[in-house]
């Protein structure tokens, strides 16, 4: 079967594109490796999506998905491994070994959490190392944990963890924290959270599960062992683009460069939208808007092809 459009990603950009493309009667497949993307990982409420004064990321993306499923669209839970150009369009290959032929592709694969890349990190994923406070926070009830990263994401993670954990340390590499005042106030109020600046995390240690982290105090150069039972990594994100290397142009941050009016990449028929692109502002409403713009541009592109 030849699809008109394969959408890679089930976050706000992919879902919004799916809704718009379905209304143009395109024959669509949406492939997403997880449900919800970054919104499902978001620990605290979203307060800036129009129409919802306050809503959890998970609830909002579930509403997106429910709306998407009202339309005629095929959905696959799988990881895209490769996108290849062919004479009739593209072939999209997945981790489960499926191959889908399509006239156009929209990459809406967003961003993955940036890893620390220290010894012990990979080994202890699921055994004390987590990238998702919203998913794993409750597992750390009455435990001592660390959050790597002193920006808003790290502070928000610590605020949520304070509902469960006994004690939380936020480790920030720089000498100053970068979180908003509101988050700083909430952290101070919790009484359970301490902030360690100038901390370069060196290693995560344990036997079967994490039992400590080792960091260097960048000022005194002392190596310090901090006993913890969990480490939440909140040091930013990296665009999820491994499957599409040579068909697109990347900027310095490894984001896909798109035409701002159409969302087309350098390869005709290959489009990208949302956080995976070089758009400046990474927000839900922006990603959803980009998904809409891309879907309408894809419809025009396909009309000119036939
Ligand atoms: C901690 C945190 C807090 C945030 N708070 C807010 C906020 O309050 N308000 C706001 O507007 N924005 C917020 N954001 C930003 C917002 O979440 C993003 O801008 C938005 O989710 C981007 O949407 P997207 O669809 O481009 O990508 P994503 O949400 O990242 O979705 C990407 C999708 O692609 C899928 N995918 C990735 N790779 C593959 C692959 N190889 N194969 C198949 N599928 C794949 C993923 O599974 C996912 O379904 C926050 C982000 C974080 C991390």
Image (cartoon, helix red, strand yellow):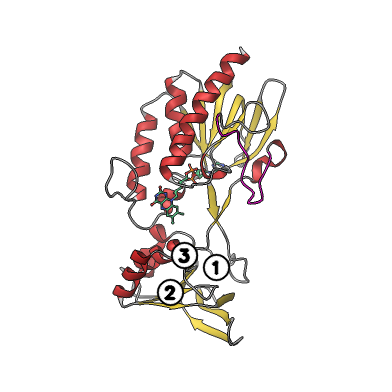
2 vs 1, front mark: 2
Query: Mark 1 or mark 2, which is nearer the start of the sequence?
Result: 1
Query: In which quadrant is the C terminus drawn?
Result: top right
Within 10 angstroms of label 3, few (less than 14), some, or many (20 or more) residues?
many
Residue identified by numbered label 1: 124
Q: Residue 130, percent across and down?
A: 48, 63
In the displayed structure image, the side of residue 278 where residue 183 appears, left or right = left
Q: Residue at x 58, y 49 (%)?
A: 239
Query: Mark 3 or mark 2, which is nearer the start of the sequence?
Result: 2
Q: Residue at x 54, y 84 (%)?
A: 225
Residue identified by numbered label 2: 145
Q: Residue 180, percent across and down?
A: 39, 64
Within 10 angstroms of label 1, few (less than 14), some, or many (20 or more) residues?
many
Name the one closer to the observer, 261 or 126: 261
Query: Mark 1 or mark 3, which is nearer the start of the sequence?
Result: 1
Q: Secondary structure at mark 1?
A: loop
Instruction: Measure the alpha-carbon separation of dots 2 and 3.
Output: 17 Å
Residue identified by numbered label 3: 151
Work out whether residue 206 can be spotted.
Answer: no
Q: Residue at x 56, y 34 (%)?
A: 260
Q: Residue 252, percent across and down?
A: 66, 50
């Amino acid at each position: 079967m030849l699809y008109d459009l394969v959408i890679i990603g089930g976050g706000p950009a992919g879902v919004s594109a799916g809704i718009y493309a379905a209304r143009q009667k395109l024959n669509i497949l949406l492939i997403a490796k997880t449900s919800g993307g970054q919104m499902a990982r978001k620990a605290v409420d979203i307060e800036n999506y129009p129409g919802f004064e306050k809503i959890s990321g998970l609830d909002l993306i579930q509403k997106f998905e429910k709306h998407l499923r009202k339309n005629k669209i095929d959905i696959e839970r799988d990881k895209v491994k490769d996108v290849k150009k062919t004479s009739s369009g593209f072939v999209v290959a997945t981790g489960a070994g499926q191959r889908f032929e399509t006239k156009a592709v929209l990459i809406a694969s967003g961003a993955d959490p940036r890893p620390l890349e220290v010894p012990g990190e990979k080994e202890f994923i699921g055994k004390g190392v987590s990238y998702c406070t919203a998913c794993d926070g409750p597992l750390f009830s009455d435990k001592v944990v660390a959050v790597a990263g002193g920006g808003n994401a790290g502070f928000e993670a610590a605020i949520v963890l304070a509902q469960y954990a006994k004690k939380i340390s936020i480790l920030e590499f720089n000498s100053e924290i970068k979180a908003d005042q509101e988050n700083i106030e909430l952290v101070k109020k919790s009484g359970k959270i301490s902030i360690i600046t100038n901390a370069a995390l060196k290693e995560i240690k344990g036997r079967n599960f994490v039992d400590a982290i080792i960091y260097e105090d960048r000022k005194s150069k002392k190596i310090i062992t901090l006993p913890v039972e969990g480490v939440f990594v909140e040091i930013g994100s990296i665009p999820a683009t491994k499957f599409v290397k040579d068909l697109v142009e990347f900027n310095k941050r490894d984001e896909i460069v798109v035409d701002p009016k159409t969302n087309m990449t350098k390869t005709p028929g290959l489009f990208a939208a949302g956080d995976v692109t070089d758009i400046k502002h990474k927000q839900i409403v922006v990603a959803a808007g980009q998904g809409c713009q891309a879907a309408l541009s894809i419809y025009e592109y396909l009309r000119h092809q036939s």
